[in-house]
Amino acid sequence: MNTDDRTTVEDVMSAPLETIAKDATVMEATQQMREKDINALVVRTTPRAIISSTDVLDAVAEGKDPTELEVSDVMTTDVETAAPDLYMEEVAAMMTTYGIKHLPVVDDDYVGMVSSTDVTAHLS
């Protein structure tokens, strides 16, 4: 297989990117994820951040009320990102190395999201 035939992040990423404000409630984040049928939202902060269904699940398991929490209370900060031209095999390796399920795709600014589901669907 030559490199021209290899699938890149840009070929499979979800776009447009779904985002949420850091001061939104966790309940609002979960409602948006459910409405869009996704498991993570980018939080436009510095450093880069994301809120995932796992972050929400962890908070609820700790007895926290998602209607009282803000996204900034549970989001994961300083997240890894992927460039649109990365090959899917490279993304799979990154997800395995870092133990993550979502990678925001960044090309100067956010352009999309790639998930472990996208990777699995492509590589299977």
Image: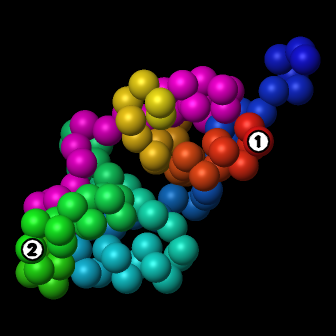
Colour mapping? rainbow
Residue positioned 51% across, 41% down in the render: 105
Q: Residues within 10 Å of mark 2 (few under 14, many from 20)?
A: few
Residue positioned 88% across, 26% down in the render: 5
Q: Furthest-top residue in view?
A: 2
Q: Mark 2 falls on what kind of element?
A: loop
Which residue is identified by label 1? 124
Q: Which residues are magenta?
A: 71-94
Q: Furthest-front residue in view?
A: 61
Q: Amino acid at mark 2?
A: Lys
Say which quadrant the N terminus sits in.
top right
- Horizontal side, residue 118 vs residue 2: left or right: left
Dot label at residue 64: 2
Above or below for 2 versus 67: above
Q: Position of residue 99 (x, y in %)?
A: 38, 35
Residue positioned 9% across, 74% down in the render: 64
Q: Is residue 110 in sight in this rendering?
A: no
Q: Amino acid at mark 1?
A: Ser
Q: Position of residue 8 (x, y in %)?
A: 71, 33
Q: Position of residue 42 (x, y in %)?
A: 37, 56
Q: Is residue 40 in sight in this rendering?
A: yes
Residue 48 drawn in magenta: no
Dot label at residue 102: none
Q: Position of residue 49 (x, y in %)?
A: 28, 48
Above or below for 75 versus 12: below
The residues tagged by marks 2 and 1 sit, at their Cα atoms, a distance apart of: 38 Å
Above or below for 90 versus 57: above
Task: Give the quadrant of residue 57.
Answer: bottom left
